């Protein structure tokens, strides 16, 4: 049985937080909101509790977890040989959506790090998350609170869909504000390497780290993983998803044509696209949409990547629940948090990517 407690995102009730902390310190699992996505938390120093996290998510033991702290002052408890660049990043972007890979302290169990000598560390900004870390008094290992390879949860309802019964307590603090996971930077390498684009943009990072290396995360599923979490299949809906990448008008034309072909073949087509694209496609696909053969669903706008990131997983999950045969998706470009959106859609697409040539300006 999963108990659900509502909690105010701005001013969490200390009694609810104390209750949640006692579940964690007794070896239980608590799902809680962070500013990025909901996390599934366990005492990071308790190997049995950490094992339950992997079991609940059906996550392979080879994929290590992020350790969450209440504040940067606790960093030396979990990491050692902390390079100056990590301190600079932590002081600049914590509390916030940034995860740093560092050498681990021996106290961190192998189960957390999948046997690696390094540990992923983050100080979340969300008030509920920080109050929980503070009340626990121990570092909290927390992956995203979704079943392995499913889209990450940005609402309490998503956590219940995936993990009802497998989690002791769920704190419902409303929708996550950022909507994609934290940015991961490996600080054990020189220069540091961006392993996952996320809530802190690479534009923000390069102001402090001009030599930051951006590593491609798109390893094929049958290749050995170059780094954990780099499997191509991830964030995947039930319906096969194809992502269209390019300038807005070219993408709209190509998606519209592709959707009509598929409808003619008898498929039910889900379209996940920014509002500009949905508005452009609506007249073209009106008849099929009226007949329920095309499901047009907007997530944010190309002109507002932050709103798109916030809505992405929520709209993807809702569309997938309508059981289309296929999903055609468009992204919002690569600027700012758009890079994280593109990364998640690429991985949901498992290689089904259609690059549409950019239309020259003024054309
Ligand atoms: O925003 C977030 O980061 C959310 C919230 C809950 O904090 N958490 C999250 O955790 O996204 P998860 O487990 O879904 O993603 C963690 C990623 C995985 O891809 C994992 O492989 C990588 O971090 N990771 C963890 N430890 C690592 C390590 N020592 N070296 C390299 N990558 C690591
Ligand atoms: Mg995850």
Image (cartoon, helix red, strand yellow):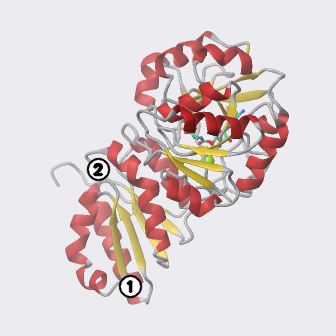
Q: Could you tell me if residue 69 is visible in this image?
A: no
Badge 1 vs badge 2, beta-carbon distance below 8 Å: no
Image spot of residue 144 (x, y percent): 60, 46
Q: Quadrant of residue 133?
A: top right
Disc 2: residue Cβ within 8 A of ligand 1's nearest atom: no
Query: Dividing the image into 4 quarters, which one contains the C terminus?
Result: bottom left
Q: Which mark is residue 159?
A: none
Please tell me in which quarter of the rendered image ligand 1 is found: top right
Residue identified by numbered label 1: 263
Q: Residue at x 48, y 52 (%)?
A: 155
Q: Residues within 10 Å of mark 1 (few under 14, many from 20)?
A: some
Q: Residue at x 44, y 66 (%)?
A: 318
17 left or right of 64? left
Q: Residues within 10 Å of mark 2 (few under 14, many from 20)?
A: many
249 left or right of 316? left
Residue identified by numbered label 2: 302
* Element class at badge 2: loop
In the image, is residue 276 above or below residue 171? below
Q: Quadrant of residue 248?
A: bottom left
Specify the farthest residue to the top.
84
131 left or right of 80? left
- Decide which of 74, 211 is in the foreground and name it: 74
Q: Residue at x 69, y 28 (%)?
A: 139
* Element class at badge 1: helix
Specify the farthest residue to the left.
362
- Decide which of 97, 357 is in the foreground and name it: 97
Image spot of residue 15 (x, y percent): 56, 35
Image spot of residue 274 (x, y percent): 31, 57
In the image, is residue 157 above or below residue 9? below
Query: Dividing the image into 4 quarters, which one contains the N terminus?
Result: bottom right
């Amino acid at each position: 049985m999963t108990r659900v407690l509502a909690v105010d995102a701005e001013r969490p009730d200390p009694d609810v937080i104390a209750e949640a902390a006692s579940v964690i310190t007794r070896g239980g699992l608590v799902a809680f909101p962070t500013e990025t996505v909901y996390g599934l938390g366990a005492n990071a120093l308790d190997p049995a509790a950490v094992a339950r996290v992997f079991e609940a998510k059906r996550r392979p033991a080879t994929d290590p977890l992020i350790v969450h702290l209440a504040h940067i002052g606790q960093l030396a408890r979990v990491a050692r040989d902390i390079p100056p660049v990590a301190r600079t990043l932590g002081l600049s972007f914590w509390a916030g959506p940034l995860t740093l890979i560092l050498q681990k302290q021996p106290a961190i169990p192998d189960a957390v790090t999948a046997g690696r000598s390094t540990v992923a560390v983050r100080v979340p900004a969300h008030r509920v998350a920080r109050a929980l870390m503070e009340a626990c008094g121990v570092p909290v290992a927390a992956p995203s609170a979704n079943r392995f390879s499913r889209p990450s949860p940005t609402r309490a309802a998503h956590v219940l869909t995936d993990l009802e019964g497998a989690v002791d307590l769920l704190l419902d603090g409303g929708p996550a504000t950022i909507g994609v996971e934290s940015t991961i930077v490996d600080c054990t390498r020189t220069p540091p390497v961006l392993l996952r684009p996320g809530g802190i943009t690479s534009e923000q990072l390069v102001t402090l780290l001009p030599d930051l290396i951006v590593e491609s995360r798109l390893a094929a599923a049958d290749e050995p993983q170059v780094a954990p979490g780099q499997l191509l299949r991830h964030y995947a809906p039930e319906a096969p998803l194809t992502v269209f990448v390019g300038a807005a008008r070219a993408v709209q034309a190509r998606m519209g044509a592709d959707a009509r072909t598929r409808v003619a073949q008898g498929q039910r087509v889900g379209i996940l696209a920014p509002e500009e694209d949905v508005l452009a496609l609506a007249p073209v696909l009106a008849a099929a949409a009226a007949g329920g053969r095309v499901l047009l669903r907007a997530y944010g706008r190309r002109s507002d990547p932050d709103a798109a990131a916030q809505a992405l997983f929520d709209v993807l999950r809702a569309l997938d629940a309508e059981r289309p045969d296929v999903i055609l998706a468009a992204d919002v470009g690569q600027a700012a948090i758009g890079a994280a959106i593109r990364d998640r859609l690429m991985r949901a697409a498992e290689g089904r990517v259609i690059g549409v040539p950019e239309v020259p300006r003024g054309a």
